[in-house]
Image (cartoon, rainbow, N blue to C red):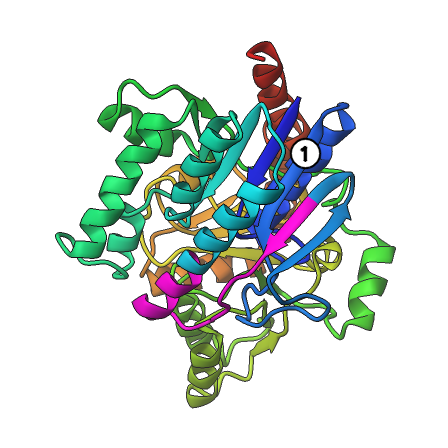
């Protein structure tokens, strides 16, 4: 089997789709198949091309997969013009160089968002005689409307909705990372063939605390932290809620908030923390993916936050926190909240409920036994329900059966 993965995001970038897709590629390769990844020059989330990359084209090999990187206009600005330029530059470069360099394949998996990458996917799947698998990580344009990025009825919204329908119509298979996503797609496009390809975690990488992990984190200057967030500092995460809760707790003993990562909202968050005189909050630069398990293993509580209800949004950092045997405070609702409640892996707080977030933090600070129990529950659930090797194996077997 030859699988092409078309994605704007891929390591050495750090992030949920990067980790998920690179591990998928590795596991497919280990099964004896061929994987080619067509992706952009790494630039996320800082909006700058990584050192050692750049130009129009670069080819490399990563963990058994052939990787073709093409030009992208890098930016961290969240304005519509800059984002569209970022997306469309890779759509064009991937379509051009993919036409010239890709070999025929059995399947072509397209990662969405960005939804516009479906244009390149449709073209390349036809050209390379590959069945297109449209992998939906977030429902666009619906999520963009909820976040205020798009206005309902605008030309960009109508174009996005049209493209969404085209991608679903011509995809051989539509995969989604959450049941809510697939339910929405099936309701609107009942003829779609769908497959649940949920997020997950490598439970051999993300493990409970030990001395080695604490030693590694100590060298990084992060020791004894109480509350930790690791990930993108973007619009959807709503990290201003964490700062507002930290303000309520700034004079209370035992709270230290550590926020690790980067993104378009980070500068604003740092400024806000200074204006609020938050002596209990520290910001750190993003860490490479191999360092994240050690960091999470040193936390007493791990935060997973969303600004509002986004249908189908189940952050991958939730699974990583659970595998690390750490209690989670989840600021979200919907399917992610259902997972935390079902497995008793933490406390769920509604987005915008700052008093509820502060109360949850106090409860876990004062209840070490509760923290340990929730952590053990999360670890058990990650091993039995959310192990990534099992998730990828189910997709691989499905594709093999349909060759």
* Left or right of residue 343: residue 336: left
* Left or right of residue 152: residue 245: right
Using the rendered view, name the quadrant where residue 331 is placed.
bottom left
Q: Is residue 373 visible?
A: no
The relative height of residue 144 versus residue 195 in the rendered view (above or below) is: below
User: Looking at this rendering, what residue extends furthest in the top direction?
Assistant: 401
Is 355 colored magenta in this rendering? no
Query: Circle 1: is it few (<14), some (14-19), or many (20+) Cα within 10 Å?
Result: many
The relative height of residue 262 versus residue 181 in the rendered view (above or below) is: below
Residue 118 is situated, as x and y percent measured from the top left of the image, at 40, 41
> Which element is circle 1 on?
strand
Q: Quadrant of the N terminus?
A: top right
Which residues lie in the magenta part?
A: 67-87
Q: Is residue 365 visible?
A: yes
- The one nearer the camera, 26 or 216, is 26
The relative height of residue 161 versus residue 188 in the rendered view (above or below) is: below
Residue 311 is situated, as x and y percent measured from the top left of the image, at 32, 42
Is 73 colored magenta in this rendering? yes
Determine the residue positioned at 45% across, 85% down: 271
Q: Quadrant of the C terminus?
A: top right
- The one nearer the camera, 377 or 271, is 271
The relative height of residue 28 versus residue 378 in the rendered view (above or below) is: above
- The one nearer the camera, 267 or 213, is 267
Using the rendered view, name the quadrant where residue 355 is placed.
bottom left
Numbered circles on residues, count: 1
Determine the residue positioned at 23% across, 48% down: 159
* Left or right of residue 31: residue 328: left
Residue 102 is situated, as x and y percent measured from the top left of the image, at 61, 38
Determine the residue positioned at 53% across, 46% down: 7
Q: Which residue is mark 1?
A: 35
Residue 277 is situated, as x and y percent measured from the top left of the image, at 47, 88
């Amino acid at each position: 089997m030859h699988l092409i993965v078309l994605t704007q995001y891929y390591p050495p970038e750090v992030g949920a789709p990067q980790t998920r897709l690179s591990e998928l590629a590795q596991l497919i390769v280990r099964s004896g198949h061929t994987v080619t990844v067509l992706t952009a020059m790494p630039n996320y989330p800082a909006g700058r091309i990584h050192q050692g990359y750049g130009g129009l084209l670069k080819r490399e090999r990563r963990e058994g997969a052939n990787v073709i990187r093409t030009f992208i206009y890098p930016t961290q600005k969240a304005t519509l013009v800059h984002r569209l330029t970022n997306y469309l530059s890779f759509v064009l470069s991937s379509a051009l160089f993919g036409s010239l360099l890709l070999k025929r394949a059995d399947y072509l998996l397209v990662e969405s968002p960005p939804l516009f990458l479906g244009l390149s996917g449709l073209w390349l799947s036809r050209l390379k005689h590959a069945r297109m698998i449209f992998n939906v990580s977030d429902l666009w344009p619906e999520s963009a409307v909820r976040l205020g990025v798009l206005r309902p009825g605008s030309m960009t919204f109508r174009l996005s909705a049209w493209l969404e329908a085209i991608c679903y119509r011509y995809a051989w298979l539509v995969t989604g990372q959450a049941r809510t996503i697939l339910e929405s797609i099936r309701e609107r496009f009942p003829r779609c063939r769908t497959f649940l390809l949920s997020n997950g975690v490598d439970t051999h990488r993300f493990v409970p605390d030990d001395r080695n992990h604490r030693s590694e984190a100590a060298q990084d200057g992060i020791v004894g932290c109480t509350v930790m967030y690791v990930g993108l500092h973007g619009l959807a995460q709503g990290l201003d809620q964490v700062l507002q809760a930290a303000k309520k707790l700034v004079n209370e003993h035992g709270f230290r908030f550590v926020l690790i990562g980067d993104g378009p909202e980070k500068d604003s968050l740092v400024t806000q923390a200074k204006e609020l005189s938050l002596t209990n909050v520290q910001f750190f630069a993003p860490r490479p993916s191999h360092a994240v398990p050690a960091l999470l293993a040193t936390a007493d509580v791990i935060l997973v936050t969303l600004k509002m209800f986004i249908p189908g949004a189940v952050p991958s950092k939730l699974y990583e926190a659970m595998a690390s045997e750490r209690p989670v405070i989840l600021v979200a609702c919907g399917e992610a909240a259902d997972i935390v409640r079902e497995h008793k892996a933490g406390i769920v707080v509604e987005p915008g409920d700052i008093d509820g977030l502060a109360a949850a933090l106090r409860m876990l600070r004062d209840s070490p036994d509760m923290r340990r129990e929730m952590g053990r529950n999360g670890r058990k659930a990650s091993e039995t329900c959310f192990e990534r090797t099992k998730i990828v194996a189910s997709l691989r077997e499905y594709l093999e059966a349909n060759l």
